[in-house]
Image (tube, rainbow, N blue to C red):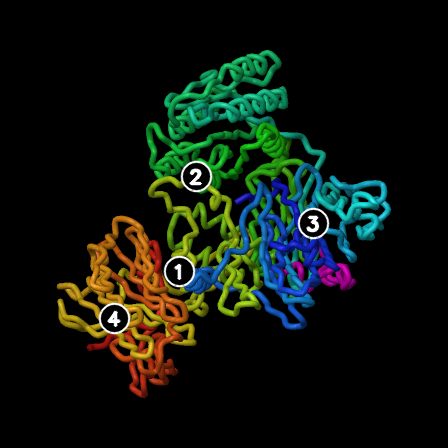
Amino acid sequence: MEGRAFVVLLVIASLIVLAENTDHKNAIEIYSLHVDSTVTSRFAHTVITSRLVNKVNESREAIFEVELPKTAFITNFSMSIDGETYPGTIKEKASAQEQYDIAVSHGQSAGLVKTTGRKLEQFHVSVNVASDSKVTFELIYEELLKRQLGKYELLFKVRPKQLVKHFQIDVHIFEPQGINFLETDSTFMTNELTEALTKVQNETKAHILFKPTIGQQKKSPELEETLLDGDFIIRYDVKRSVSAGDIQIVNGYFVHYFAPSEMPTFPKNVIFVVDQSGSMSGRKIEQTRDALLKILEDLRPEDHFSLITFNSLVTEWKNTLLQATGQNVESAKRYVKTVMARGGTDINNALLTAANTLDKASYAEILQAHSISMIILLTDGQPTVGVQDVEIIQQNIQKAIKGKYVLYCLGFGFDVSYKFLEKMALDNGGIARRIYEDSDSDLQLQGFYQEVATPILKDIEIQYPENSILELTQNSFKLFFDGSEIVVAGRIDNELDVLPVEIQAQSHTSNLIFKEEANVREKEKVFQHQKYIFGNFIERLWAYLTIQQLLEKSISAQEEQQKNLQVARALELSIKYSFVTPLTSMVVTKPDDQQKLHLANKPTESDNEKSRVTGFSGNKLTKSHITKALSYRRHHDQSMYYVHRAPKTVFRTVQTTAQLLTNEYPHFLFQLPRQNDVICLNIDGQPQAYINLISDPDKGVSVTGKLGRNRNHFVLFEITNLDPHVQLRVSKEGTVLSYGGHTTKLPWTKSASSTVQGLKIAVEKERSLTMSASANITIKITFIKSPNRFLGLYFMDTDHFSDKASGLLGQFYFDTHLESNPGASQGEDERVLSVHGQKHRVTRKNKKDYRQESATGIISCWSLHITP
């Protein structure tokens, strides 16, 4: 996560609305395109509205694309066609993904969001527009701006691809601290377009309006081509003084900004650990050398530094750190020029050598007493020499560093596991950053160094009254860099009239204490001008910041239970505040096909990687983690709660880990039709006996199953489909497909697929088999290999079963519902399951979820035992 205070994040929107596959120029006409952005106290709320009309006598496809920051959260999207609106719905990701998977199996789906660059994600949706019809697209996203090198930036990437009658970018900025400077820039601005730009600014407010006419948009009077193709940029900073910062309050929530300046910089002790393996050859190693030469020149005379290069072997420029004198810097530059790329990649030994070098320098008292020590790793690949298990490497480095030094990890290109680097950096107080292979890769490396080159405070603790502040975000920080900003938010107790704050920190020359008091009533008066705020924006800012920090903490969490709690809380907030985060998805139903689903997921930095480290999943927010978090959220809303009080965060749980988790897989998992409740069913059947699970004559499908010898699990399923007449025999060895007198074997050892008259059968290697047909039930069988090999059966599209379905499972798919149980035992979460009038007692349990990829996936469900 790039969630440290010194990392700049841009508000970016690229606007592209196109007509595809048309012989008529501008058959789809954009007659209005508005970008309305309100920035209130660094929190940006952007609404992009595009209105189109189909001018030709036949339907055409309109495409709406917006590029937004990777750090932004989409909060809403809708399409309106001829007055009817089709909104997007934000759901828990595992639930949305299951709905999406069903659509995929029917060929009725498309992804909406993908990563398109270093800072961008692209939201993309298309819709079929009938002749003379109008369509309106509206996308809303929010993010907290981060200050970098003394400024905030809003960058709108403008690409309408045609002349637009009503085009405008309308930005309102309100900063109660006062606006120190404000500037605009553009890559496409001409003298004519400059006349369309107005900027009005006073002490605390700014209004930027860019509203070019059709004539001003034209490249020339003769051409119907637009000049609007590039970047529109707004940069600004706020006024600040050497104090405890600025506190702002709205409706019981506060945000506290702290960004001191004009302080002496700590001397740094820096070791650059540089990959020179064979994969770095060519342009990469050349750009790395160029960047290091520039970075060495930027070292301050009071800094100490060293260089370590590694491939199959680890090479030290010097066996200690040297002061950054002119002579030593020149010596290091000569060494850098000799670095060549060849050999393997021993990341573990290289980082252990760096930590040991810092240890030796510290013991020898070479380093200044008040200084900051850091290791900066640059690598482009996976470990191939020495220790290659990334989890062991992470453990080794954390033990070696012991919290004494900060580790920054830079991943060059997409052949490196970003998750590996990210966890290792977060475990050791740093961050990870991807360096993109491009003509400016050397500038990216230099830019990162500039962000961490000027530490001015360390060990920052921000304290608030312990009994009056609830749900506080992170309030202690290891380092603060000049030009960045610390942001803390929380909820204020209703009885509090004055909010005091005390900041303790260490500068290069002394220990510092800053104190401030904020009058709650007076602070709330500042935001009474509704034009410049949007709803409870500080509450949303708090939720945004909390989600980001919880996701970051979950990456470096040492215990699975701790990780689950953090993910559960982040998921809960994502759904409550309608944010599309890595834990949630937006489902959009296309108006031209009510069965076609689009899914907007939040990509992570590792989603673009070409390869992953074998066996490495410990740090991934997998679908099972999200499902597990959802089960915690649903089941333990009353028993699990969070109390955030300064100066630390306390997690309290009523139930223990042993009570929450169980090692059991149920025989069957299924969701009741048109209900959200999941049933975990175990049966008391005879070993090796065939059981009629479901038979639906209307749908022409039946399934039987056979229990294994120990009756713990099913080892065989037979599926019969009547139209077309296909039989599947699925066992632990694989699948036998029978059709028209012919048989085909589909082993688990490889992925394969087959289609018979519209019926699709697909095997995912060593994972699952799926049988699906349009407008029918989808059947999925998972292959579980651990601890004992067995098969798990579940159905999708269960609403499609008819009321003639019968069998052990078939009976549950109509005339079935849950009822309250007045006679429930004290302390037990019990219900009554009514099945065709028969009553069954069910109890809420946590079970292993065989539907998930991970063997540790847990689901909260209503547990039931029956005898066939």
Q: Is residue 517 visible?
A: no
Can you tell which of label 4 and label 2 is closer to the viewer? 4
Residue denoted by label 3: 161
Question: Mark 1 and mark 3: span between their CA atoms?
Answer: 45 Å
Which one is closest to the eye, mark 1 or mark 2? 2
In the rendered view, would you say 276 is above or below 478? above
**Image-based side of 683 in relation to 438, left or right:** left
Secondary structure beneath dot 1 equals helix
Name which quarter of the figure residue 372 lies in: top right
- Residue bounds of the magenta highlight: 516-540
Of the numbered discs 1 and 2, the one sitting upstream in the chain is 2
Write the residue at 37% across / 80% down: 818
Separation (CA) of disc 3 from disc 4: 54 Å
Say which label, 1 or 3, has the lower sequence index: 3
Mark 3 to mark 2 CA distance (whole Å): 37 Å
The residue at 29%/86% (across/down) is 838
Magenta-colored stretch includes residue 553: no
4 or 1: tag closer to the N-terminus: 1
Amino acid type of the residue tagged 2 in the rendering: Ser
Q: Position of residue 686 (x, y in %)?
A: 14, 71
